[in-house]
Image: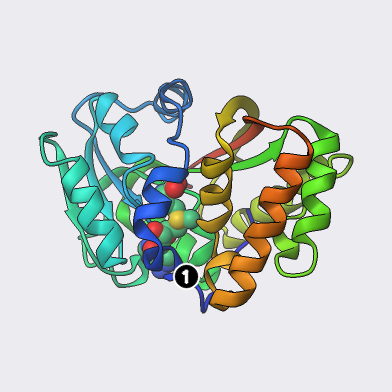
Amino acid sequence: MKANSRRDNKLAFNEVADVYDGARPGIPHRLVTFLVRIAGLAPGDQVLEVGAGSGQLTRPLRAAGLEVTALEPGDRLRALLARHTADAPGITVTGGFFEDCTAPDGSFAAVVSANAWQWIDPAVSYAKAAGLLRPGGHLALVWNFPIAADWALQRALNEALAGDYPDAVRDPDTHLPGIEARVGEGRAELAASGRFEEPWWQFSTDILTLTPDAYCDLLLSYTNAVVLDDAARADLFHRVRAALTAHGAGSVTMDNVLYAVIARKADQ
Ligand SMILES: C[S@@+](CC[C@H](N)C(=O)[O-])C[C@H]1O[C@@H](n2cnc3c(N)ncnc32)[C@H](O)[C@@H]1O
């Protein structure tokens, strides 16, 4: 996905770390298995994970046998990440921004990131990743984009969301084309860096089944809800809950569209 032009809110997730931890879906193991295969990784390989949050990608990376340095600048998220991975040797949790990472050049077989790469300045991110990678190493990036599977429900939610939280409005007819456009711009950004070969990329979809509370927490875990003032946020979630109740939705089924892109470092 293309880098955000405004990155001021990049630490907003840390403000709602507990909600984030409970609400955000983990990256599926099957996708990580795929990434490992495409990137030619082997158990014991060193990988750097950028923007690890509370471990949504970290744990499946470790389960694949990789040695993970998990970089997370938010102190509350990092504390949760450390707690969740305390019993997992092979995961090193560290703080700071990727831009400031001081690991020696060539340290990693892969630089990986889920839902975080867009928060890093593209003038820095690709060159920095290429420097940290060993020859033939890979950059592997993942995002997920949930949308209510029932389009009538999504449209009712859109009405509740539109005023205060337009970024959470999902037009079922343009959801996938919209994602395709944004990730296409991201691949253009990657190509323009000149540091990586033509990437491999893939879309896939999982199903998430959420309670109304879990759906509200998912909304709250995104920056646009975090930055609302308390009154606006309370009013918004009142409207969202009313839309869920009116629709008779005891649970919310979401199509969770996953996008993965993997690029080999260009030979010099
Ligand atoms: C949307 S969260 C993704 C967390 C987790 N990987 C996931 O998939 O749910 C983005 C994460 O990137 C981190 N982040 C933001 N800017 C960063 C930077 N410049 N360097 C490293 N991490 C950054 C944030 O603290 C946050 O945890």
**What residue is disc 1 on?**
10
Residue 51 percent across, percent down from the top left:
38, 56
Residue 185 percent across, percent down from the top left:
72, 55
Which amino acid type is shown beneath numbered disc 1? Lys
Q: How is the image coloured?
A: rainbow
Residue reaching furthest to the right: 173
Q: Quadrant of residue 145?
A: top right
Q: Residues within 10 Å of mark 1 (few under 14, many from 20)?
A: some
For image coordinates 48% across by 67% down, the residue present is 120
Question: Helix or strand or loop: what does disc 1 sit on?
Answer: loop
Q: Say whether residue 139 is left or right of residue 71.
A: right
Query: Looking at this view, is 93 or 216 the one in front?
Result: 216
Ligand 1: which quarter?
A: bottom left
For image coordinates 59% across by 40% down, the residue present is 212
Q: Is mark 1 within 8 Å of ligand 1?
A: yes
**Can residue 116 be seen at all in this image of the molecule?**
no
For image coordinates 30% across by 66% down, the residue present is 73
146 w.r.t. 75: above or below: above
Q: Say whether residue 262 is left or right of residue 150.
A: left
Query: Looking at this view, is 126 or 175 the one in front?
Result: 175
Residue 80 percent across, percent down from the top left:
24, 51
**Can residue 63 be seen at all in this image of the molecule?**
yes
Q: Quadrant of residue 144?
A: top right
57 w.r.t. 231: above or below: above
149 w.r.t. 135: above or below: above
Residue 13 percent across, percent down from the top left:
43, 63
